[in-house]
Amino acid sequence: MTAFWILAPVMVVCALGILVVRKAVHAALLLATVMISLAVLYAVLEAPFLFVVQIIVYTGAILMLFLFVVMLVGVDASDSLVETIRGQRSAAVVAGIALGALLLVGVAQLSLGTTVGLEEANAGGNIEGLADLLFSRYVLVFEVTAALLITAALGAMVLAHRERASAKPGQAELAAQRVRDFGTKGAHLGPLPAPGVYARHNAVDTPALLPDGTPAETSVSQTLAARGTIRHAPDLADDIEDVQRALGGPAGGAGTPADTSAGSGHNTENPSTGNATGAGGPGASGTTGTGTDEEAHR
Amino acid sequence: MTDVTPYVVLSAILFSIGAVGVLTRRNAIVVFMCVELMLNACNLAFVAFAKQHGNLDGQVAAFFVMVVAAAEVVVGLAIIMTIFRTRRSASVDDASLLKY
């Protein structure tokens, strides 16, 4: 029983965690903890076969499939805590507590009697005993299960398959479409702006700055925007004084905070100053220039 | 011989938590995880009762639950991916076309 009293609180806490965590990946990891703990409980309950199957099938296959889909789908903003139906969340919690109370009262009313234990049933080996049952009394269920698995595999293939309604557009068609969009809607003709390049950050999650100092939203991937992991570009320039102090004395002319706020526009007008001021000028890069060019087109 | 009642109680608690999760969470993938939690809670009860009654039928039932859960996850995740591909969202609130 020691294993049970150690694992049961862990499982309940992790299960409650699934209800409150915001990110789907965290929920998957908490669920993995619950499932591995369950596997240990199966081992305690004299079910060695289910112990292994729980780890291999549930934690190994099903949960990895979950993580795979979480990565594919991307962590979008659907984890919001805003209620669409008023009072739905509290009503659901009340209903859940009522269900739990009902089940617990039901269990409390049971008198289970003495536990028989599986020593006798497991005498010839747990796996042999299960196989005996599976291929004698439950053989029809076993066959139906096979049909179910084949149906599921086919269904997944059909659902995941995408039939192309029209031919895939080639390079010439795409280019013609771009020019047409430019003519009719005034869409930007060139490629999307690259992410921002700053003295200390040039990762893809740092947006480029437009001439007025606002970040260019098209310069970072939409997936990152949905995840909300985009760096705040003006923040990158805010601590420029601290950095200069740490480096010992002013490093360049364009490094004052007053200059930084308007720095990107200034530097794009004459890119050569970007090289001259060295590390001092944030946003002194051709990348930002792409963003401003796009704005100029509009 | 140990009593299996604590296992059944834990199973009931996990099942209720899973049910609340299905009702409250909005991300379809997390809703699915909560369904899995409920199935696992049922499995725990099956295995506990197998020990209580001293035969292996409960363990066979738990095994079949696992198989059905695997099939369900495969199809369900494929549906979620298809919905995400067309609507760019995995939220259960966004798939409300039948409502109108």
Image (cartoon, coloured by chain):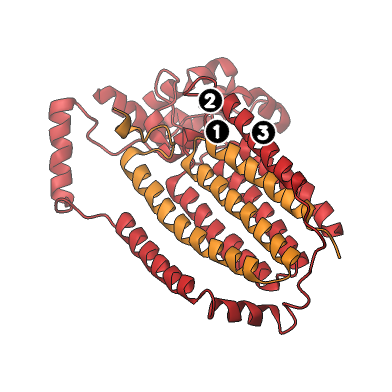
Chain colours: A red, B orange
The disc labelled 3 sits on which kind of residue?
Ile
Q: Which of the 4 quarters of the picture holds residue A285?
A: top left
Q: Is residue A258 left or right of residue B72?
A: right
Q: Which residue is mark 2?
A: A88
Q: Which residue is mark 3?
A: A97
Using the image, name the chain to which the residue with label 1 belongs.
B
- What is the distance, in whole Å, between disc 2 and disc 1 at their CAs? 8 Å
Crowdedness of circle 1 by 10 Å Cα count: few (<14), some, many (20+)? many
Q: Which residue is mark 1?
A: B24
Which one is nearer the viewer's eye here, A175 or B41? B41
Taking the view exactly as shown, the residue that stands out farthest to the top is A258
The disc labelled 1 sits on which kind of residue?
Thr
Q: Disc 3 on helix, strand or loop?
A: helix
Is the residue at mark 2 from the same chain as the one at mark 1? no
Which one is nearer the viewer's eye here, A236 or A24? A24
Using the image, name the chain to which the residue with label 3 belongs.
A
Q: In the rendered view of the protein, which quadrant contains the C terminus of chain A?
A: top left
| Image location of residue A68, percent across then percent down | 49, 55
Q: In the rendered view of the protein, which quadrant contains the N terminus of chain A?
A: bottom right
Is the residue at mark 2 from the same chain as the one at mark 3? yes
Q: Is residue B59 left or right of residue A213?
A: right
